[in-house]
Every structure is written in structure tokens, then in C-alpha cells.
């Protein structure tokens, strides 16, 4: 006798079911059942009657193939729910795509019907039995374009996600468990709480024959389908450059063991005012490197990008960022921002591209424990190769947060000007990632060669400034709100 599933799919298909309009094999099967004699058909009256008695069919029964997804959830009312969710999530999206997440038991039902039709009618493939997900899209996409007044694009940055759940899913997945552990009841018991992934279900179904379905498959009759709709847009990216004039301000919030060590940070002074314009659930602050708390960043500043996630708005006028930039620059004297602008995700990646190839220019105020004059300083610095390649073990001061390793870095420009016998200003252009403080004092020999070795006397650093971060990002903006400031320039070759 055939399984209960036969009765379900033969008489419990909704009006939108693709079997009724697209599956020639199913139509042929139905016609054959009417035409040929009951005695010669694989299914006789007694079979169907027995199935009827066992099923006790109720009015709550759903469409066997689509569990009502193609019937109830293609209505005008459902489209309006999608529209409301989309417009609430992001008001000015320009296109959309739709992602469907369907219950795993639909895979089982699809496989059962495929094997059933193959056995009783003829070879069945995807063209004969459409996937529910594809059928839903065929029914809905054109209508959604009309309702949302936006085009559908498969790679759209605005995603509408619809998740369908079926209350009988677990019951049907147990059929697969019974098949998988049919020869080992003890193993079946120990894996009673095993979860099923889509890949695992597909793998098991590939091994199932129609006869296996007959033995193990028990479809859920009165299961209920529910859904959730969500929508989100790809992040909005805002880029610029910042100067830091304080020697007591960290780049990111300074929190240790849950205790805040500083009132604010560069990140907060910049991102929070922009957040008033770009309304998003959260943000991530990225920069081209970082300076220590006691290091200033001068010149044209350090490039940064702020990724605003799940924005409620995505299109902005340049003038809006000019206003936001002005707000930041008048809010504090410790930080100044320039070239604030919206960029694409692809453009934002430039901040991390060539991370170790880019160069940075520094100026350091140094102290020596024994006197030195300009002539000796020039002679000793001239004795080193150009570029000078140094080996730096992870500095002691960052061992708690950096991997212990030796890094090779190059210094392409090195010059100094004496201030008095014990002090001089050092100008250097380095490969990104160079620990300048450790290059000066040597870090107990962990950086070699170092300035202490080159000058043959102990040298320490009193103050350090970043003069330039040599990366062509973001583009410079020319507008009347940018104050003219004499930048300290340093080209890519450090000349």
C-alpha cells in the first residue's frame, strides 16, 4: 500500500500549486487514474479507502507541496506587509532582492513527489516539478516591483528576507532519522537531539528510494505555516581624514576590564556627530593605522572610514557632510576633520589595500644622555644605508595585544636637526607598521639597528608627531568650508 503522502498530494494541492499547471507528469498520472481500470492501476479503491480512514482529514490541512506558501503568502495583503517592512527598514532604497528561507521538510516532500512520479509515470526532473522558491519568485517579483516602485536586482544591496516556519517540520525530519539509524537503534537514541542542516537533509534524501519513503516517511498532516519578514540595506560608508592635536586622547574608546580610562576618544568625537545624520543600528570605525594616545596627527591627517550598519537612509547630499564636518570641528579643539564624504564599499577597501606598502612621515623630539652637535649627528646618520632595514620584535609595551614575532620594516628617510646639545628633532619616513619609539631607544635590543646604536649613545623619545599618512584616500574636496591650512607634505617616496 502507498504511504499517506499519496493521499495528501493527490487531493490537497492549493490553487496556486505548480503541479496543477506546470507538471505534465502529474496531469498524466491523474488522467491515467480516471481512464484505466481500477484493477490495472497501481492504486486500487481499497488502498485509498484505507488511507482515508487512517488520515482523518481535517479542514486545517495544508497544501502538501508548498504548505500554503504559494497560496496564502502570494496575496495582495502579504505584499503590503512586505512593503511596510521594506519602507520601515530603509526609506530610500533604489532596488531590492528577496531571500526566502523555507522549512527543510519541503525538501523531503519535493523528493518524495519526484520519486513517486518517477516510479508510477516516468522520469521526473526539476522542469517537471518546480522548486517552491522559484515558483514563489515567478508569482511575486513583478508584482513586488509594482508595489515597491523599485526594480528587482539579484545583487541589490537592499535585501528583503522572508523566513517561513512549519510546525510539523521536526515530525517529518524524524523520518530521516529513522532511516539513517534503521540498523542501529542505540545510535538513534544517542542522536535523538541531533539537528539537521540543509546539506545533511539533501545527502540523506539522495540515498532514499521510493520504497524507503514507503517504510519510513510520515508527513505532518495538520502542521501550521508561519512567517517573519525583515529587511536591511548594506552599510553606508563615510570617509574622511582627521587631525589629532591632543597627547591625552586615544583613537578608540579606552576601556580596560570594563572600566573606562578616558572620557572620550577620536572615534567618538567623529562618529557620534555623524550618527545624528546617518541613522543606523551601529557603526564600525576603521582607520589607516593608529597613533598612540600621546602622539599627535598633523598635516592632512589620517584617513578613516566609518561603516554604518543597517541604515534607515542611504542617500545623502554632499552639503549634509559639510555640515557634519563643521559640527565636529566646532565641538572640540582636540580633533579636526576634513574631506568628509560618502564612499562606496569598494572605495572604502582602499584604506586597507597595500597596508604594509604605504609610508608614513614622523617628527620626533629626542633626548640624548651625552652631548651631540649637528656635525656628528649628520655624520652618523649619513653612515647608515638608504633605505635602512630594521628587525623589530614585538615591542614590550604591546605584548599583551600583539602576536610575538619579528617584523622587518624599512626607513626611507632619516635626518635630524640639533636644538641644543641634548635635544634634536628627528624626521623620518617609514614603512607602515614601523614602531618609531622602539626604533629610537631600541626597546632593550628588541629593535636592530636602532638610533641608540647608530649614534652610539642612549637616545629616548620625548614627543612624537605623525606628519603624513601617504595614501591617496579619500579624494580631497574643494569647498569654501575647508579652512586653508599649510599641510606638511611628504610624497610616496619620502622625498
Image: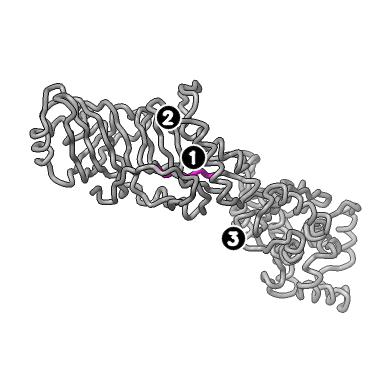
Q: Residue at x 84, y 76 (%)?
A: 31
Labels 3 and 1: the sequence-earlier one: 3
Labels 2 and 1: the sequence-earlier one: 2
Viewer-side residue, 438 vs 171: 438
Q: Are marks 2 and 3 in contact (CB under 8 Å)?
A: no
Magenta segment's dominant SS is strand
Quarter of the figure with residue 279: top right
Residue 3 on the magenta span: no
Q: What residue is pinned by disc 2?
A: 250
Task: Measure the C-alpha gap from mark 3 to mark 1.
Answer: 26 Å
Magenta residues (range): 302-307
Quarter of the figure with residue 3: bottom right
| Res 3 seen here | no
Q: Position of residue 257 (x, y in %)?
A: 47, 22
Element at label 3? loop
Q: What residue is pinned by disc 1?
A: 285
Q: Position of residue 461 (x, y in %)?
A: 24, 27
Task: Measure the C-alpha gap from mark 2 to mark 3.
Answer: 39 Å
In the image, residue 420 sits, relative to residue 218, either above or below, namely above
Q: What residue is pinned by disc 3?
A: 155
In the image, residue 33 sits, relative to residue 312, either above or below, namely below
Relative to 378, 334 lies left or right: right
Q: Position of residue 14 (x, y in %)?
A: 84, 62
Q: In which quadrant of the rendered image does the N terminus lie?
A: bottom right
Looking at the picture, the colour scheme in use is one colour
| Res 307 seen here | yes
Labels 2 and 3: the sequence-earlier one: 3
Q: Which of pointers 3 and 1 indicates the residue nearer the eye?
A: 1
Tell me how many marks there are. 3
Question: Are there few (<14), some (14-19), or many (20+) residues within 10 Å of tag 3?
Answer: few
Q: Residue at x 71, y 71 (%)?
A: 118
Amino acid at each position: 500500500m502507498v504511504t499517506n503522502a499519496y493521499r495528501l498530494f493527490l487531493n490537497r494541492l492549493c490553487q496556486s500549486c505548480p503541479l496543477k499547471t506546470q507538471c505534465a507528469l502529474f496531469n498524466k498520472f491523474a488522467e491515467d487514474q480516471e481512464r484505466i481500470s481500477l484493477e490495472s492501476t497501481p492504486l486500487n479503491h481499497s488502498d485509498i479507502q484505507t488511507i482515508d480512514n487512517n488520515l482523518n482529514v481535517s479542514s486545517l490541512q495544508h497544501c502538501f507541496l508548498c504548505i500554503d506558501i504559494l497560496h496564502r503568502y502570494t496575496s495582495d495583503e502579504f505584499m503590503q506587509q512586505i512593503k511596510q517592512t521594506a519602507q520601515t527598514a530603509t526609506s530610500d532604497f533604489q532596488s531590492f532582492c528577496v531571500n526566502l528561507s523555507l522549512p527543510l521538510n519541503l525538501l523531503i516532500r519535493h523528493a518524495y513527489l519526484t520519486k513517486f512520479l518517477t516510479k508510477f509515470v516516468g522520469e521526473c526532473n526539476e522542469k517537471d516539478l518546480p522548486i517552491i522558491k522559484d515558483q514563489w519568485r515567478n508569482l511575486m517579483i513583478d508584482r513586488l516591483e509594482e508595489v515597491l516602485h523599485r526594480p528587482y536586482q539579484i545583487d541589490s544591496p537592499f535585501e528583503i528576507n522572508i523566513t517561513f516556519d512549519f510546525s510539523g517540520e521536526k515530525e517529518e525530519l524524524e523520518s530521516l532519522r529513522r532511516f539513517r539509524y534503521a540498523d542501529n537503534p542505540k545510535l538513534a537514541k544517542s542522536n535523538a537531539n541531533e539537528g539537521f542542516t540543509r546539506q545533511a537533509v539533501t545527502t540523506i534524501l539522495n540515498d532514499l528510494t521510493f520504497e524507503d519513503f514507503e517504510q519510513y516517511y510520515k508527513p505532518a498532516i495538520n502542521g501550521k505555516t508561519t512567517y517573519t519578514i525583515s529587511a536591511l540595506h548594506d552599510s553606508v560608508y563615510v570617509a574622511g581624514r582627521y587631525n589629532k592635536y591632543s597627547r591625552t586622547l586615544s583613537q578608540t574608546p579606552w576601556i580596560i576590564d570594563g572600566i573606562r580610562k578616558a572620557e572620550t576618544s577620536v572615534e567618538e568625537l567623529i562618529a557620534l556627530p555623524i550618527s545624528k545624520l546617518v541613522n543606523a543600528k551601529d557603526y564600525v570605525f576603521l582607520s589607516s593605522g593608529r597613533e598612540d594616545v600621546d602622539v599627535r596627527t598633523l598635516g592632512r591627517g589620517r584617513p578613516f572610514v566609518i561603516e554604518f550598519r543597517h541604515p534607515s537612509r542611504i542617500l545623502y547630499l554632499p552639503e549634509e557632510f559639510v555640515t557634519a564636518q563643521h559640527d565636529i570641528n566646532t565641538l572640540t579643539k582636540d580633533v579636526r576633520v576634513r574631506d568628509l564624504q560618502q564612499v562606496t564599499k569598494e572605495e572604502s577597501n582602499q584604506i586597507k589595500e597595500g597596508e604594509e606598502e604605504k609610508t608614513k612621515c614622523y617628527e620626533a623630539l629626542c633626548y640624548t644622555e651625552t652631548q651631540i652637535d649637528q656635525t656628528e649627528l649628520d655624520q652618523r646618520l649619513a653612515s647608515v644605508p638608504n633605505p635602512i632595514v630594521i628587525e623589530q620584535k614585538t615591542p614590550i609595551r604591546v605584548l599583551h595585544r600583539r602576536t610575538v614575532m619579528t617584523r622587518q620594516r624599512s626607513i626611507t628617510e632619516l635626518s635630524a636637526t640639533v636644538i641644543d646639545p641634548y635635544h634634536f628633532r628627528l624626521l623620518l619616513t617609514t614603512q607602515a607598521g614601523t614602531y618609531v619609539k622602539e626604533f629610537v631607544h631600541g626597546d632593550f635590543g628588541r629593535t636592530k639597528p636602532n638610533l641608540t646604536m647608530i649614534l652610539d649613545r642612549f637616545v629616548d623619545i620625548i614627543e612624537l608627531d605623525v606628519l603624513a599618512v601617504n595614501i591617496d584616500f579619500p579624494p580631497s574636496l574643494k569647498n569654501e568650508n575647508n579652512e586653508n591650512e599649510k599641510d606638511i607634505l611628504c610624497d610616496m617616496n619620502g622625498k
